[in-house]
Amino acid sequence: MFVWFLRPLRFLVQAFGSDDSPRQLALGLSLGMLIGLMPKDNLTVAALSLLLFATRVNLATGALAAFVFSWVGVWTDPAANRIGWYLLSLPALQGFWTTLADLPIIPWTSFNNTVVLGSFVMGLWLWVPVYLAAMPLFVYLQPRVTARLRRFKVYQLLMGTELASHWRIG
């Protein structure tokens, strides 16, 4: 009955309590950072979200990072605007942008928007540093946090809620 209420909490606990490798956690964080930095009303974010769901990265870490970096993205929009404006106004790239705009699906990516293009480039630029910074952090933290979480009864209850939700009594 209240399993729908516990699912987000279970999702959060599963980020560290799962048996995913630190590499999967770091990749989830990096991909979530890229999704979170971008404005959400375009095909690019939909494709990146599909990539998050389709690959073997930690979904909970990616979703949490996307949520956190969505708030950070508000403060990075002025810098993203400047980056996007610079790239869209380069004379050497004018033909490239015109060709992209004439293709059937590419306008839905909103790369003609300075903030979208700048956020995407900023996210790609930060991808490797975020991954390299997160990897040793997850190598250090994940086994310790997992061992601590597994001792708590609440963790055991949260991990058993999916199984219990499918049982029918009477």
Image (cartoon, rainbow, N blue to C red):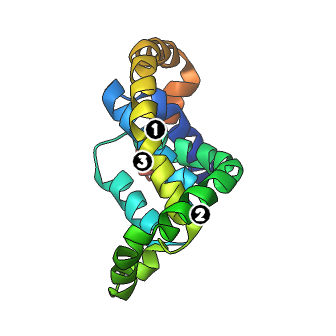
Q: Secondary structure at mark 1?
A: helix
Question: Residue, x 38% and y 16% (percent of image)?
Answer: 139
Question: Residue, x 53% and y 32% (percent of image)?
Answer: 13
- Asked if the residue under mark 2 is in contact with the one under mark 3, i.e. CB atoms within 8 Å, the reply is no
Q: Quadrant of residue 38?
A: bottom right
Q: Which of the labelled discs sits on residue 45, or is there none?
A: none
- Asked if the residue under mark 2 is in contact with the one under mark 1, i.e. CB atoms within 8 Å, the reply is no
Q: Secondary structure at mark 3?
A: helix
On screen, residue 121 above or below 68: below
Q: Nearer the viewer, mark 1 or mark 2?
A: 2
Residue 9 is situated, as x and y percent measured from the top left of the image, at 59, 40
Mark found first going from the N terminus, 1 or 2: 1
On screen, residue 23 above or below 32: above
Q: Which of the labelled discs sits on residue 115, or is there none?
A: 2
Residue 80 is situated, as x and y percent measured from the top left of the image, at 59, 55
Q: Is residue 8 left or right of residue 15?
A: right
Question: Residue, x 50% and y 75% (percent of image)?
Answer: 112
Q: Amino acid at mark 2?
A: Val
Q: Which residue is mark 1?
A: 29
3D distance between C-alphas at marks 3 and 2: 14 Å
Residue 83 is situated, as x and y percent measured from the top left of the image, at 55, 56
3D distance between C-alphas at marks 3 and 1: 13 Å
3D distance between C-alphas at marks 1 and 2: 22 Å
Q: Amino acid at mark 1?
A: Leu
Q: Which of the labelled discs sits on residue 124, or is there none?
A: 3
On screen, residue 163 above or below 1: above
Q: Amino acid at mark 3?
A: Leu
Q: Secondary structure at mark 2?
A: helix
Query: Crowdedness of circle 1 by 10 Å Cα count: few (<14), some, many (20+)?
Result: many
Residue 20 is situated, as x and y percent measured from the top left of the image, at 33, 30
Mark found first going from the N terminus, 3 or 2: 2
